[in-house]
Image (cartoon, rainbow, N blue to C red):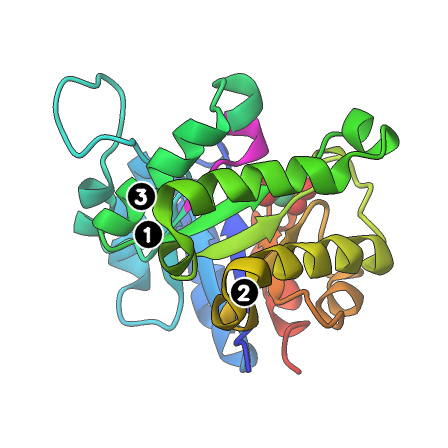
């Protein structure tokens, strides 16, 4: 039985004041969430505040990116050990915004996955196709390529220590959610791809859906056989909305 996971991806949003307000709201409502593991992935500069507020609660936290390097002359980057130093449990790897705006290749994403594991973090590996790729009928080819690069670099057992998020790029921040059937189809494909290397990893892997998931559509998505939770962007910025998505995983 895979425990559902709902992770918030705050992206580059917030201020000290809004972060404090959001965390207070999450803490006061988290007791209504009984089934899902819950986490927030905050901008790195707010992680000390997140740690101070969430320490001792059931809510975990994480970063949104990590350097492929352990330390050294990499101006502006943040090492996995630094995230771990501030109590991070998770880190998002290979988000489509990193792939698109920071030219992160499949290989770079694979190296970051390894670095995250080396620091003891649980990577949330994002995969997903663009609208053009979906319309071109190559969704599975794209997702397989993104996944295979990490399996080839890290090995299937290390991949099994992470989480996968299927995020169709055309559904991110657009209000256009994949239908539960569309999402389930790709989730089942991803699980099958993992099973080709290890049935045990495939069975245990939590595969999250991400892309305009909100309190209205979350329950139907999470009810699908291969959807084990969500990676939530916009709806994670309001405590009530995020908690409602988390509660949709009470099953
Ligand atoms: P969204 O973002 O929920 O705002 O679509 C999801 C994500 O990018 O992780």
Report how far apart the C-alphas of labels 2 and 3 lie in the structure: 18 Å
Q: Position of residue 70 (x, y in %)?
A: 17, 34
For residue 50, which numbered disc appears in the image? 1
**Badge nearest the viewer, 2 or 3:** 3
Q: Which residue is mark 3?
A: 114
> Magenta segment, which residues?
92-98
First of labels 2, 3 by sequence position:
3
| Residue 79, percent from left and from top | 22, 35
What x and y, as percent, mark residue 173? 70, 36
Whether the residues at callouts 1 and 2 have beta carbons within 8 Å, the answer is no
Nearest-to-viewer mark from 1 and 2: 2
Of all residues, the one furthest to the front in this rendering is: 196
Closer-to-camera residue (168/63): 168
Quadrant housing residue 33: bottom right
Upstream in sequence: badge 1 or badge 2: 1
Q: Is residue 230 left or right of residue 105?
A: right
61 is higher (above) or lower (below) than 229: above
Residue 95 covered by magenta stretch: yes
Does the numbered disc 2 mark a residue whose Cβ is under 8 Å from ligand 1? no
Ligand 1 quarter of the rendering? top right
Question: Quadrant location of the N terminus?
Answer: bottom right
Does residue 192 appear to the left or right of 31 in the view shown? right
Q: Is residue 229 above or below residue 193?
A: below
Establish whether ligand 1 lies closer than 8 Å to the Cβ of label 3. no
Q: Position of residue 205 (x, y in %)?
A: 52, 65
């Amino acid at each position: 039985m895979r425990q559902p996971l709902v992770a918030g991806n705050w992206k580059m949003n917030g201020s000290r004041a809004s972060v404090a307000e959001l965390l207070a709201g999450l803490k006061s409502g988290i007791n209504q969430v009984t089934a899902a593991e819950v986490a927030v992935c905050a901008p790195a500069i707010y992680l000390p505040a997140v740690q101070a507020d969430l320490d001792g609660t059931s809510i975990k936290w994480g970063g949104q990116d990590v350097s492929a390097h352990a330390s050294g002359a990499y101006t502006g980057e943040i090492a996995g050990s630094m995230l771990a130093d501030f109590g991070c449990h998770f880190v998002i790897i290979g988000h489509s915004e990193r792939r698109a705006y920071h030219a992160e290749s499949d290989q770079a994403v694979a190296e970051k996955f390894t670095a995250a594991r080396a620091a003891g973090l649980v990577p949330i590996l994002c995969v997903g196709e663009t609208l053009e790729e979906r319309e071109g009928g190559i969704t599975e080819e794209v997702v397989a390529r993104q996944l295979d690069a990490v399996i080839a670099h890290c090995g299937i057992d290390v991949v099994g220590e992470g989480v996968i998020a299927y995020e169709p790029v055309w559904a991110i921040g657009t209000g256009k959610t994949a239908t539960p059937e569309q999402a389930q189809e790709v989730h089942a494909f991803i699980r099958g791809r993992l099973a080709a290397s290890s049935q045990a990893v495939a069975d245990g892997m939590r595969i999250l859906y991400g892309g305009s998931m909100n309190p209205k559509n979350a329950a139907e998505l999470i009810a699908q056989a291969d959807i084990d939770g969500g990676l939530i962007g916009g709806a994670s910025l309001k405590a009530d909305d995020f908690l409602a998505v988390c509660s949709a995983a009470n099953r």
